[in-house]
Image: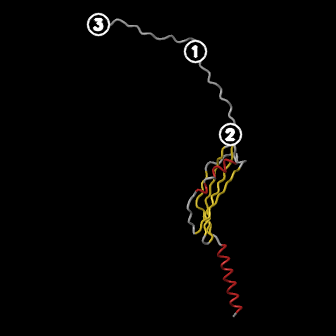
């Protein structure tokens, strides 16, 4: 009987360990904007938030993500942004994670535009003057 009780205890302990380590992950949203042709400088930032019973009191954990991306791209422009929001449940605890990635693109200096030449005319235009004419007499 002791062997059976020990066997049951081990089984319950193993079941509790498996249940405690099991997780369910779901993808909440994904978004992408236009991806540049030059993808040589990838940038990435991740933030997460954990809550008991999935009760989250705020969403401000993602507020620093834009500044994290721009800090990785000084003097450039972050474009081709891909965002992913995942939620993972670990029995009684939910963890939300937002991942943002993109590409740092530096604008090429554009060539200075040539000044627009004014059109020169061969003869200057004379101002038009109106002259009063005598009223015409009506003909029969």
Of callouts 3 and 1, which one flags the residue occurring earlier in the amino acid sequence? 1
Which residue corresponds to mark 1? 121
State the separation of the CA atoms marked 2 and 3: 77 Å
For the C terminus, the quadrant is: top left
- The residue at the point 69 percent across, 91 percent down is 4
Report if the CB atoms under discs 2 and 1 are less than 8 Å apart. no
Tell which of 133 and 138 is nearer to you: 133
Image coordinates for residue 34, horizontal then vertical, percent: 62, 48
Could you say which quadrant of the image residue 3 lies in?
Answer: bottom right
Counting other residues with Cα less than 10 Å from the Cα at mark 3, is it few (<14), some (14-19), or many (20 or more)? few
Counting other residues with Cα less than 10 Å from the Cα at mark 2, is it few (<14), some (14-19), or many (20 or more)? few
Secondary structure at badge 3 equals loop
Residue 139: which disc?
3
Report if the CB atoms under discs 3 and 1 are less than 8 Å apart. no
- The residue at the point 70 percent across, 50 percent down is 42
State the separation of the CA atoms marked 3 and 1: 45 Å
Closer to the eye: label 3 or 1: 1
Of callouts 2 and 1, which one flags the residue occurring earlier in the amino acid sequence? 2
Position of residue 99 relative to residue 103, above or below, is below
Closer to the eye: label 2 or 1: 2
Of callouts 2 and 3, which one flags the residue occurring earlier in the amino acid sequence? 2
Residue 110: which disc?
none
Counting other residues with Cα less than 10 Å from the Cα at mark 1, is it few (<14), some (14-19), or many (20 or more)? few
State the separation of the CA atoms marked 2 and 1: 40 Å
For the N terminus, the quadrant is: bottom right
Image coordinates for residue 78, horizontal then vertical, percent: 66, 46
Residue extending furthest toward the bottom: 1
Closer to the eye: label 2 or 3: 2
Tell which of 119 and 100 is nearer to you: 100
- The residue at the point 58 percent across, 61 percent down is 28
Residue 107: which disc?
2
Report if the CB atoms under discs 2 and 3 are less than 8 Å apart. no
């Amino acid at each position: 009987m002791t062997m059976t009780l020990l066997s049951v205890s081990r089984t319950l302990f193993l079941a509790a360990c498996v249940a405690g380590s099991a997780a369910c992950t779901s993808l909440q949203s994904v978004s992408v904007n236009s991806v540049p042709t030059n993808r040589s400088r990838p940038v990435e930032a991740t933030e997460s938030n954990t809550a008991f019973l999935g009760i989250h009191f705020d969403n401000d954990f993602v507020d620093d993500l834009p500044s994290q991306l721009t800090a990785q791209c000084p003097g450039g422009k972050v474009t081709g942004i891909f965002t992913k929001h995942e939620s993972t449940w670990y029995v009684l605890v939910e963890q939300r994670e937002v991942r943002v990635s993109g590409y740092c693109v530096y604008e090429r200096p554009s060539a200075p535009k040539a000044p627009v030449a004014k059109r020169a005319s061969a003869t200057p235009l004379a101002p038009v003057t109106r002259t009063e004419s005598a009223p015409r007499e009506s003909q029969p």
